[in-house]
Image (cartoon, grey):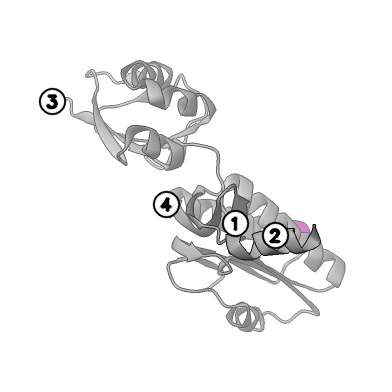
Amino acid sequence: MGIRLTRRPLSIAAAEAALDRSPAGAVVLFAGRVRADRRGRTVVGALQYEVDRRPALAALASLEREARRRFGARGVVLWHRLGRVEAGGTAVVVGACCPHRAEAFDAARYLIDRLKRTVPIWKEERARSARRPPRRRARRAGRSSG
Amino acid sequence: MAGPIHVRLFSTARVALGRPSLDWPAPGGGVPARVLVGELARAYPPLAPTLKVSRFLRNGRYLRDLDETVLAGDEFAVHPPYGGG
């Protein structure tokens, strides 16, 4: 339950529920969503994620152990989407349940930072055209201001 | 009988070659990873820049160094820099 690589949508509520089984005072959850960044005349419409599953699962398991050892985490969530995720969709959820808030914040930050650097997951942008305001309206506005 | 090395390509490595894997002939005693990577770079020039920044796995385990021998029948994975999240 703590580690998940899935093509299904991720839910913060489900992650919180998973951590509810770990009795401790502080829960910190982080959700990373796909940004619709502009790329010239296009915007990022979606990201396509791929994974090398076996080493990825081993790396995630190692991160979970590390969070328990370094921060005293009683529960850990490391969930990542695979396949296509539309802009605005949640691509990753990490969370930690620790006795106190400082460790929980540190653990969650550690988990997302290390996940991005050490887990064999890659993303590829899928562009869509950026809709511009209608040209006619822009011209009119230009004339009226002159 | 020596079989090929099964090379798996991810992300920019896959895009550079336009396919997710290839089979590479291996001598009976295997080949040092350094030599294999050099052969791949020469055979597929678009792949060369990615190989310079990639990590490599043999049968699912990260190579400690490029002197490690890759044997016929092994799986050899090319991992460009990661980008999850």
Question: What element does badge 4 sit on?
Answer: helix
Residue A67, label in figure: 2
Q: Chain of mark 3?
A: B
Q: Chain of mark 4?
A: A
Q: Nearer the viewer, mark 2 or mark 1?
A: 1
Residue B85, label in figure: 1
Residue B30 in view of the camera: yes
- Amino acid found under the numbered disc labelled 1: Gly
Magenta stretch, main secondary structure, is helix
Q: Report how far apart the C-alphas of labels 3 and 4 lie in the structure.
A: 28 Å
Question: What element does badge 2 sit on?
Answer: helix
Mark 3 packing: few (<14 Cα in 10 Å), some, or many (20+)?
few
B12 on left or right of A115? left
- Marks 3 and 4 on same chain: no
Q: Chain of mark 2?
A: A
At horizontal 54% and vertical 56% (from top left) the residue drawn is A44
Span highlighted in magenta in the image: A67-71
Q: Which residue bears the numbered disc 3? A: B1
Question: What element does badge 1 sit on?
Answer: loop
Viewport quadrant of the C terminus of chain A: bottom right
Question: What element does badge 3 sit on?
Answer: loop
Q: Which residue bears the numbered disc 4? A: A54
